[in-house]
Image (cartoon, helix red, strand yellow):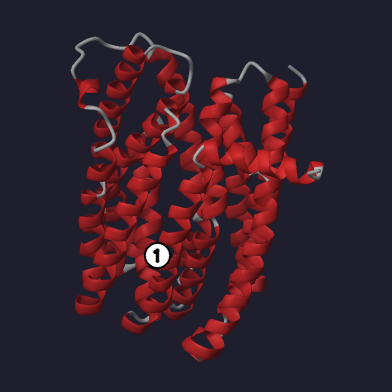
């Protein structure tokens, strides 16, 4: 006779497997494993200051890529995951794609203006390369939309395949170009990778979706979701990268900024499991958003699962940083384990509400997310600015952890209100 616990575990495994969890997770792990190879590789060809500038390029570009999407990728995920006709989904997809391309061009122009009046005055090297690196904005914004559509249709396996192709191409080009051409090769290969990255996702989008000539009658609904998402995501992204923006603004020495930036690569590697769960949760929540009890139970379950994984991941990241510093990187990266420890703390706090945040997207609670970000992001920036003279870089890490804790409390409060008091 089988144990009830064994049967329950089999049911859980079958459930997440049917949703494409293991396909997406295994593809992400495979790519992150290779990505960790890049983490080992970069210090051998780039100096700490060059790594710092590379991370700043990425940090600023992420912000303007999200401005370029203008929230239409999230609106697309939300609306197309609902029970509407195939024709309506096609019309929504086209509308969101066109709007994304339009706003991504505006975003690039905005980046040029910000670079002219601010970035080049703070960091001369960054100011030189930002207009070139910013070319990735429209390509990346389009990929966000294509990914959102596939996720809305629960085509998680197709997303996994496309991600593997894109990231393998990206890693191959980055390693090759950086090895032969250094920092310049890193920048140019990144631009090429973003352009090439459109095609694997486009292969899974049926051409018939572009054949119709009708327009969606859901523009008001889409725009409502997009605008609140846009403001919320922009404010949240500024909060996520506030540490790097602040360190650049406060003119921290390039070598220390480089080591800190390098530590953030560990954080990105650790986020793979939680990001995988997030990718799967939102469309299912949208589809069954009226069943609040089901939404509450499933979200809590996946949130707990993500947190348990995150504990093991954070421990592994810290241990890996210690070993890397001692046996490979050397004294130049002596602060790396301490930075990774602090960032892992922020990662654990984030992992306590990341799935809840994805469920709030599925429930269409964009307005609350914007208001929450509007409170927590300035708090993190102000505290970081105040703590820096006292505790140096570690003060900014502490400030980010406080902001993440406030976000945790706010997300759970909004989620409770949305599911338990409706």
- Residue 46: horizontal and vertical position, in percent? 33, 79
Pick the residue in front: 337 or 132: 337
280 on left or right of 59? right
Q: Please name whichever residue, 342 or 301, is drawn nearer the observer in this view of the structure.
A: 301
User: Residue 232: x and y, percent?
Assistant: 51, 36
In the displayed structure image, the side of residue 115 where residue 7 appears, left or right: right
Q: Residue at x 21, y 70 (%)?
A: 185
Could you say which is closer to the camera, residue 2 or residue 352?
2
Circle 1 packing at 10 Å, graded few (<14), some (14-19), many (20+), is many
Q: Position of residue 231 (x, y in %)?
A: 47, 34
The image quadrant of residue 226 is: top left
Q: Quadrant of residue 35?
A: bottom left
Q: Disc 1 marks which residue?
A: 55
Q: Identify the element where label 1 is drawn.
A: helix
- Name the spot of residue 106 as percent of width and height, x first: 26, 37
Q: Is residue 351 left or right of residue 93?
A: right
Q: Is residue 405 visible from the viewing direction of this image?
A: yes
Q: Residue furthest front?
A: 1
Residue at the (55%, 30%) spot, across then down: 361
Q: Is residue 13 above or below residue 164?
A: above
In the displayed structure, 282 sits above or below 29; it is: above
Depicted 346 relative to depicted 220: above or below = below
């Amino acid at each position: 006779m089988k144990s009830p616990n064994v049967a329950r575990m089999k049911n859980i495994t079958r459930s997440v497997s049917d949703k494409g969890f293991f396909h997406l997770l295994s593809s992400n792990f495979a790519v992150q494993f290779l990505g960790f190879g890049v983490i080992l590789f970069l210090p051998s060809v780039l100096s700490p200051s060059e790594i710092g500038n590379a991370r700043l390029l990425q940090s600023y570009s992420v912000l303007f890529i999200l401005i370029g999407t203008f929230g239409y990728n999230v609106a697309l995920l939300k609306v197309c995951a609902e029970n509407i006709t195939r024709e309506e989904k096609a019309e929504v997809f086209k509308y969101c794609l066109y709007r994304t391309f339009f706003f991504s061009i505006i975003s690039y122009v905005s980046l040029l203006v910000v670079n002219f009046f601010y970035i080049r005055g703070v960091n001369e090297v960054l100011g030189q390369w930002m207009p070139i690196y910013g070319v990735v904005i429209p390509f990346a914004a389009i990929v966000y939309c294509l990914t959102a559509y596939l996720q809305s249709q629960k085509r998680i396996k197709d997303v996994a395949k496309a991600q593997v192709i894109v990231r393998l191409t990206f890693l191959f080009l980055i390693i090759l170009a950086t090895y032969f051409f250094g920092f310049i090769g890193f920048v140019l290969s990144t631009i090429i990778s973003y352009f090439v990255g459109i095609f694997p996702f486009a292969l899974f989008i049926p051409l018939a979706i572009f054949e119709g000539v009708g327009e969606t009658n859901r523009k008001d609904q889409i725009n409502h979701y997009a605008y609140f998402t846009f403001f919320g995501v922009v404010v949240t992204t500024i909060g996520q990268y506030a540490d790097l923006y602040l360190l650049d603004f406060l003119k921290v020495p390039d070598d220390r900024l480089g080591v800190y930036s390098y530590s953030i690569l560990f954080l990105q590697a650790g986020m793979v499991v939680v990001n995988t769960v997030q990718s799967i949760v939102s469309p299912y929540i949208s589809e069954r958003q009226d069943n609040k009890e089901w939404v509450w139970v499933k979200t809590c379950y996946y949130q707990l699962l993500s947190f348990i994984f995150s504990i093991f991941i954070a421990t592994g990241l810290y241990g890996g940083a210690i070993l890397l510093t001692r046996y490979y990187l050397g004294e130049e990266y002596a602060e790396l384990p301490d930075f990774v420890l602090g960032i892992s703390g922020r990662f654990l706090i984030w992992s306590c509400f990341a799935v809840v945040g994805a469920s709030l997207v599925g429930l269409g609670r964009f307005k609350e997310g914007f208001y929450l970000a509007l409170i927590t992001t300035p708090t993190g920036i102000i505290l970081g600015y105040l703590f820096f003279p006292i505790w140096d870089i570690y003060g900014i890490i502490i400030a980010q952890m406080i902001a993440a804790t406030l976000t945790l409390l706010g997300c759970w409060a909004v989620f409770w209100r949305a599911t338990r008091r409706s």
